[in-house]
Amino acid sequence: MPDASAPAGKLSEVEGIKRASRQLRGGIARSLQDGGDRFVEDDAQLLKTHGIYQQYDRDTATPRKKQGLDREYQMMARLRVPGGRLDPDQYLALDTMAADLGNTSLRVTTRQTFQFHGVVKGDLHALIHRVNRQMLTTVAACGDVVRNVMATPAPIADSIHATLNRVAREVSVYFEPRSTAYHEIWVDGEPVDSGDGWAKQDEPIYGEVYLPRKFKIALAHADDNSVDVFCNDVGIVALFDGDDLQGFNVLAGGGLGMTHNKPKTYPRLASPLLFVEPEGLIGAVEAIVKVQRDRGDRSDRKHARLKYTIDDMGLPAFKAAVDAMAGRSYAPPRPMPRFRIVDHRGWHTQGDGRWYLGVPIPSGRIIDVPGGAQYRTALRTVVDRYRTPVVLTPQQDVILADIRDEDRAALEADLRAHGLVMNDDLAPLERWALACPALPTCGLALTEAERVRQPIVASVLERLQAHGLGEEAISLRITGCPNGCARPYAGDIGLVGRMPGHYALYVGGDFEGTRLSNRLLDKVAEADIPAVLDPLFAVYAAERQAVEGFGDWCNRLGTERLRRIIGEALPAVAI
């Protein structure tokens, strides 16, 4: 196999930037010292591995251009928080940073971490430095490396959950880049900006140019697939016999990003690849990462994810390459039981005499809404008052842990006093809806997601209730572009940004996250979404089999029958 430090053939532009970056340093330190409101494009690419995206306000871009003004640049900074776990002091410190140096909000992502939004370049160093003082980091939260490692969020005091979270932390630490560029620039305060004055570190896993594309890992067990383990480059499924950990099934090749009208790009669920004993897990994952490092496509970033490497090689050949890289022959994956999704919102016992409370956070945006719910104030109040650890969930919600029985009523009353709505007050569709940030900050967004979540959910729920389906657990996921950050291709209904005000409609996945959806319609206007879904809901209510989920029903009927149902009810809709 070719060595990752010397890739052959034509490289993409980003590969050239990484190669010339002096192990991810580039001109970042110099740019921070020189001032200005933005980084040059090469450095903006390198910033991603430092956990930072350079963005601009797309709402104001056109009016400002007409006035001869430049864009309003701002930064998004993402944390790496394995398993989404924070202690009370960390949470409170992050909340303060969001107020001091961001746009006052913290945003829970679908990968169990926080993002700061609206950070101006001049405040970026102070923010990242303060993050690290809390024993947290932003390094490898983005970029062509292993990103935030997810794990089943429930803070239950048993060996299953303790194992998953311990392993998530171990994997996260093991795959952190070895380059000291991050600490030089953001932590130690001694940035090196001369081409001759930096010390090269060995990168035994990533090589000189790191991975061809981002790499996502999640851990789950069959009784709780909250992390959507099949959607990851590597999914790790813990197999237990009672409390005894037998080992792990390792899945490979999941990934949801695609590009409209580019058939060679597509979403894919991970394939079961191998079984490994507990002590061999990190070695197996390392072998997979290294095969992707050496065999992944470095000429076309749209074809650079692990899923394409596996499909190009074929799964048996990929498995053989992993075995060769590890120097051993891994056993085939073991049978797995049916996967389930657990609702972690509301009250749950931890198994140690204490409780945890899952607090619904629409689109994960922790902010005080003018004239509405005061999410930020409420969470800060209860975390400070009751000293509750915080767990971020893949559903963009917040879990408050270690709550004493005698504090339950008062804590919930404090949240409600600030206008927060609890889980029992929400219909299932409202609980299970996801939305990415999209406009106005994401440079890839083709249309809205977070800002239209509430009206879309409300209008679709009205149609469900009209057919007696208001209490059905149906997942609705909305993204502003086809890259899939809110996992729209897995689950019951996916709305994928197609063009301003229009979405591609996907249906037929399963609620448990083990089957992909199919594209049903290509361009549905936002206002037409409820009307298009309505005839499907009507037939589903009349003809579904016992305990058949909406996605399962759509999959059973198939896209042609579903299109006929819509076409007969709405002849004007383009099928």
Image (spheres, rainbow, N blue to C red):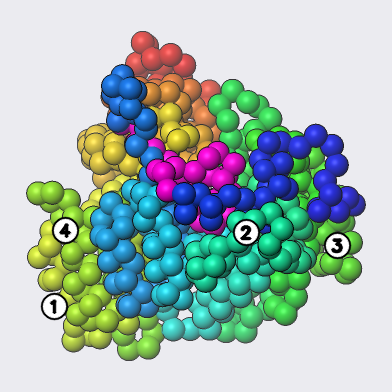
**What is the x, y in percent for residue 242?**
58, 82
Q: What residue type is labelled 1?
A: Ala
Q: Give me the residue at 13% from left, 77% from top.
A: 410
| Mark 4 vs 3, N-terminal side | 3
- Identify the mark at residue 146; answer none if there is no mark: 2
How far is disc 3 from disc 1 in space, using C-alphas? Answer: 56 Å
How far is disc 3 from disc 2 in space, using C-alphas? Answer: 18 Å
Q: What residue type is labelled 4?
A: Gln
How far is disc 1 from disc 2 in space, using C-alphas? Answer: 41 Å
| Mark 2 vs 4, N-terminal side | 2
Q: Give me the residue at 75% from left, 55% from top.
A: 208
- Label 1 secondary element: helix
Mark 3 lies on residue = 325
Question: For residue 237, what is the image quadrant?
Answer: bottom right
Question: For residue 492, what is the image quadrant?
Answer: top left
Do callouts 4 and 3 mark residues in contact (Cβ within 8 Å)?
A: no
The residue segment tinted magenta is 35-59
Q: In this view, does 27 lie above or below 155?
A: above
Packing grade of label 2 (10 A; few <14, some 14-19, many >=20) is: many
